[in-house]
Image (tube, rainbow, N blue to C red):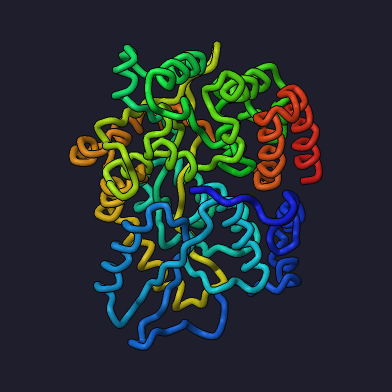
Amino acid sequence: MHRDERPGTPESGAGGISRRDFLKLGGAGVAAVATLGVAGCGGGGGPVRTESGAIEVVFSTSPSAQAVLEKLIDRFNAEHEGEIEVSFRPAPTDTANAFDLLLTQFQAGGGEIDVIGGDVIWAAQFAANGWLADLTDRFDEGMRGEFLEGPVEAVTYEGAVYGVPWFTDAGMLYYRSDLLEESGFENPPQTWEELIEMATSVRENSDANFGFVFQGANSESGVVNGLEYINSFGGYALDPNDPNNVTIDSPESVEGLSMERRMIESGAAPDAIVTYTEEECQGSFLNGNAVFCRNWPYMYALGADESASNITQDQIGVAPLPRGEGGESVSGLGGANYYITATSDQETQDAAWEFVRYMSESVQQRTFALEASLLPTRSALYEDQEILDAVPVVSLAGEALERTVPRPVSPYYSDMSVNMAEQFNASLSGSIPPEEAVSNLQEEIQNIVDQG
């Protein structure tokens, strides 16, 4: 869920405060935040009510699965008629833009959003500043035990729980199974080198314009892709056992970014890949213009939508991402959680919780899996045969999720991601060599950690 380019300068949020300054607010940030005009927890003034007297709850998230979202919201509203009415407000599909917009609204007093469908990396950052409602008692231990462990950890900050997992994600390799078969390839590529060979060969033997498309833009999606290349060669931005130890300047990182650049140099990927986010990738692949595509599980469902795809689902294959030389296949961990804003008044928070609880139930998660190919966060649904039969990406999810590598786990991640987006994009475009990119990042990220 990520599209538009970052507004303003890379160091600044939409409201003028830099990400570094925002993160410096830290735990003492509630007092500091007050100087920015942000209301304290619980809000004030009472709930907004509709003409029917229902409490209005504003839900904002990426429109990637908007059709399914609107259907479930309509169903919830019908069941709570006259009591709660949820309205949907699409957010920017690029997570950096969505983050900046929320940051601006929080600075201004919280805005009108009551429930956020947001990135897995946001919980600690927003919670540290008092902007998310503590859901520890609502999303209690018994309920949490029904969810996958990783997504629950992602909403936990300093022992408290600030969200409910919505869906989880893992980067996947999509391919035109019909075109590979016509070119004599029985299986998808296992390594990046094999992908280049297949992408070039199949493109020449077909009417596809591109061999391989992925997210290479100067954005959060570009960060995830760059890290997948680095991780697949055994490199890490931070030491997994010590998040204060910056390790991105390594031979493995250079190999990873060199391979990413080779996708363009070999002709497997177009030069314009440096501007591609998820939407450009899905457009190219579903329109029949690309042989391979790196994207999230949601794209598979679009293959069944004739208005969104010129190819059919039986022409689409799905596989784990290729591995680097001496490395292994890994996927960037993604997904989204439901967050309730602490700046909403208490009655609205209560109504918002009813909505979040409803959307988190197995029935609704099954709908998201079957109709939007979103990987569920409830453990039991991975044994649901209807889901396994209907959505191949879910049946592959167990393997892919076992190979996921999270983005650097740090309270300063948003600041780090700005630098990584810039350097990864510069390396991919050929503006600087990979060695210079990782050397720059070693210094920049170390400075961020030291200042923190």
Q: Quadrant of residue 236?
A: top right
Query: In the image, what residue occupies the spot 66% across and 47% down?
Result: 414
Q: Is residue 447 above or below residue 271?
A: below
Left or right: where does residue 316 sit relative to residue 324?
Answer: left
Residue 219 place in picture, x, y as percent? 61, 44
Can you see residue 190? no
Residue 1 place in picture, x, y as percent? 48, 48
Left or right: where does residue 5 sit relative to residue 87?
Answer: right
Residue 450 place in picture, x, y as percent? 80, 40
Query: In the image, what residue occupies the spot 43% across and 19% down?
Result: 204
* Furthest residue toward front: 207
Name the foreground residue: 81 vs 62: 62
Name the foreground residue: 148 vs 38: 38
Can you see residue 1? yes
Query: In the image, what residue occupies the spot 78% across and 35% down?
Result: 446
Q: Is residue 110 above or below residue 90?
A: below
Left or right: where does residue 172 sit relative to residue 155?
Answer: left
Please give the count of numbered marks on the rendered protein.
0
Residue 322 place in picture, x, y as percent? 46, 21
Query: In the image, what residue occupies the spot 69% across and 66% down?
Result: 30
Left or right: where does residue 103 sit relative to residue 161?
Answer: right
Name the foreground residue: 348 vs 52: 52
